[in-house]
Every structure is written in structure tokens, then in C-alpha cells.
Amino acid sequence: MSESKLEERTPTSPIANTDIKQPTERPYSVYTSKEKWFIATLVSFAGIFSPLTANIYFPAIPTIAAAFHKSTELINLTVTMYMLLQGLSPMFFGSFADFHGRRPVFVLCLFVLCLSCVGLALVPTRAYWLLMVLRCLQATGSASTIALGAGVIGDIAVPAERGGFFGFYSLGPMLGPALGPVIGGALSDGLGWRSIFWFLCIATGIACIVMLLFLPETLRQIVGDGSIVPSPIYRPWIHIIRRQSDVATDYYKPPKRKFRNPLLLFKNLDIVMLLLFNGIVYSVFYAVTASISSLFAEIYPFLNDTTIGICYLAIGLGTAVGSAGTGKVLDWDFQRAKKAYVQTHGSESMKTASGDLRDDFPIEKARLLSMSYATIILAATGMGYGWCLQKKVHIAAPLILQFIIGALSMSVMNPTQTLILDLVPGQGSSVTACNNIVRCLLGAVAVSVIDIILNNLRPGFTYVLLNGIIIISIPLIYFVIKLGPRFRKKRREAAAKTVVAYS
């Protein structure tokens, strides 16, 4: 069966995973390639606000501490609380979006974020508690956009093209840590710390309007392959891509599913191993970005707040290059695995009639095998970065290594995040929310202890320790490659029994 085709399910065949060939074939999505890229661009733009909102705050921490007459440690506590809420809130909004639709939840999150930024811009300096509350509200609104965007990619893209779309989508979320400090430092120096939140208010307000105007609903439970006309709340105000009413509407709408608790995904050992590995790599990546300002200010005293912010562009450019390149590599690896599988099993054996990959298709190997080599190079680069800082070499060396760390971090994290979308189709936002909570909690721990470790071990041994943890976690990749197909089969059989019982 063609990779971009999905055989139509009929009301008499409600079970998704069946090998009985149906008479009619349809595209997985009615959207053209250009329309899919446009949708990916929209959600990538919205996804930038979660890390941007977190990192734009860093350069202004000393200024805010002086304004509120609090210690830097107490202001840093607002960063820790932000990361905790950043991890927890997508568990609610992500699962809600998997059940009630992507578009309305996108708009709601951006609206909450916009209102919280207004409050932060106006917060009295005598009300530290209100600063903490509003930062938590800000995290609640911003964090879920990443999980929602990943769910959209899972809705519109088949596995063969999902790596490329996810790599492009990741550009937005991963540029935030680089652009945030640059923007925050410039605004704080020029217009004061409150201007940071006014900037975020205006930017998120524009993003919210863009979503209302252009983003169509993509949740397959509501619109199927995109041809089912939903209720008005799910329709974009301006149809610049294919109107749902312009295409055939004979697509069989899947039965409405019961709410699925996203926490139940943690019962799957293969998913837990992927989330843990991804969280470890993310926490080390975040430890690098969070310590740039303090380390560079100490080691290179000729830098000021603005130029330190500009130094973040090196790792940001690396993440952009890494995201784009990794997407192409993922699609190439998938096609290579597909070709090998078809030669062994035959062209009609790779997918079930519902369009899902068969249990014995080595999707885990296709996504993760190349990544294991990149992980080793990433760890070695991270160790070298630490020793360059400790030896106080020319600033060009750590900046170049930052670029490489950014690129390799994406080449490691994007494959795991793409794979978890492959493993639980229909729960893209929920599983991404699970990924978010694991990596944000580990990231919060890393941010909390990085200064303590640096003070005791200095940069050289600090980054040997952190990247050594990455190396120790590499066996998780091979466990998933080896055991993943067995877990997928169990999930498919359990899902089939659930559909039969529900029907």
C-alpha cells in the first residue's frame, strides 16, 4: 500500500488494526504538502513562546531582584516554579486537546499567556507573592503549546514524512532559548524590565489572533482526514488553505473515544525509557544554556549583559541547523528501513488496513540507531566545552562548541520525540505532555544544582559528570530497539479489545 494512503474504515469494520483489505483507499490527510508545511509553520510559531517566555527572563533577574528588594536566590525560585508548572500544565491541556480538539486549546493557552504577561508588566514591586503566582500562570499558558503542536504534526503527517515535519516544527521551540536572552537583555537595558512582559503580551496577542484566523482543526477524532466539516468553533476565520467543504465528506468518522488519562502512558516501559533518555539529554542541554550568563561573565569580564545575550545565538543557531538536518535524516532512515522491510515481507505487508505500522516493522531501529552515534559525539563535545571554559581559552572556542552542542542535542532529542508520536497514534499531545513533564522536572533539577556543582567541581569536571550521565543512559536506546516491537503488539491488542468493548 502507498505510504501516503490510508484505507478507509467502514462502519462495519470499527477495529483499526485489521489485515482485511478495504475496497477504497484515501490519503492520510486531505491537505497538500504546501498546506501541511503552512500548518507546521503556524504551530512552530506558537511553540516558540514556551521556551522564549522562560529564557527572556534570565538577563533581567538581577534588575528584578533589586526592584523587588529580594535576593537573587528568591527571584531564581520563580524560574524553578516556572519550570515545574511548565512540566505539569501540558498534562491537562495536552490530554484535553487529544479529546476536544487542538485549535480551541491553542487559542485558550495563548490567551492565558497574554493576560498573565499584562499582570507581570503591572505587578507592584512590593508584591513578590504576586510575581510568583503570575509566573506560574504564565507557565501554564505557554508550556502546552509544544505538546499541542506535536499533536498537530501527528494528525497531518504519516510516519514516512513525520521526521521532516517534526524537525521543522522543533525550530520554534528550540530557538526560544537562544532568542530569549538576546531580546530580554536588550529590552531590560533599554526600556526597563517591565518592557519584557509588554513585548510578550503583544507577541502572544498577535499569535492568538493568527491561530484564530488561520489554524484549522486537525484532530482526527473530530475532522478525520480533514474532510469532515466541524462545528464553527473548530474552523479558521480565514480559509487560506483547503476548505473542508471543498473535498469529499464520505470519510468514515471514527467513534468518539473515551477520555484517556495521559498518566497511564507511564505504564509502557518502552515509552518510559524514551522519556527518561530524552529528559536526561534535555536537562544537560538546559544546564549549558542556564549557566552561559554566569560563566561567561566570570571568565570573559569584557562582556556586558547585551553581549552575553548575543552569545546565546551560537547554541540557538546550532539547534536550528540540527532540527532541520535531523528531520531529513529521520525521513531518510525511515525510507531505508521501509525498503529493507518490503524486500523481506512484500509491499503490502508494511502497514495494516488502518494505516498503522505493523508490529514487526522496526520503527524503533529506524528512528534511534543513527541517534546513538550522535549521542556519543554530543557527550564528548560537552566535555570539551567544559574544559575550554575552565582553561579560559579564546571565546571563539566555547561558542563553536556551543553551536555543535545545539545541533547534536537536536539530533538526539528529535528522533526520540518523533518516535513517541509513532508509538501512540491519536495521543500525540498527551505523550508529548508526558515528555514535557519528565524533561522539565529533570531540567528544573539541573538548573537548581548547576551552580552548586560548578562551584565545587569547576566547569571541566562539571561537564564531564553531566555528559557522563548521558553516556551511561545510552543502553536505554538499545533496550527500546530490542523490546519495542513486543510492547507495540501488546498496546495494539489492548486497543483492539477496547474498541470491540466500546462498540
Image (cartoon, helix red, strand yellow):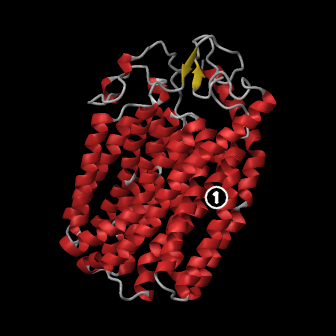
Residue 167 x %, y % = 51, 48
Look at 62% across and 67% down and name the residue there.
378
Q: Can residue 419 be seen in this snapshot?
A: no
Query: Toward the viewer: 275 or 30?
Result: 30
Q: Which residue type does callout 1 highlight?
A: Phe
Query: Toward the viewer: 118 or 34?
Result: 34
Residue 247, image quadrant:
top left
Q: How many marks?
A: 1
Q: Is residue 237 above or below residue 279?
A: above
Locate the N terminus by quadrant: top right
Residue 482 x %, y % = 78, 47
Task: Tell me if 65 is positioned left or right of 276 in this view.
Answer: left
Q: Is residue 218 above or below residue 81?
A: above
Query: Toward the viewer: 491 or 472?
Result: 472
Q: Residues within 10 Å of mark 1 (few under 14, many from 20)?
A: many
Disc 1: which residue: 277
Look at 37% across and 31% down and name the residue there.
216
Residue 60 x %, y % = 30, 73
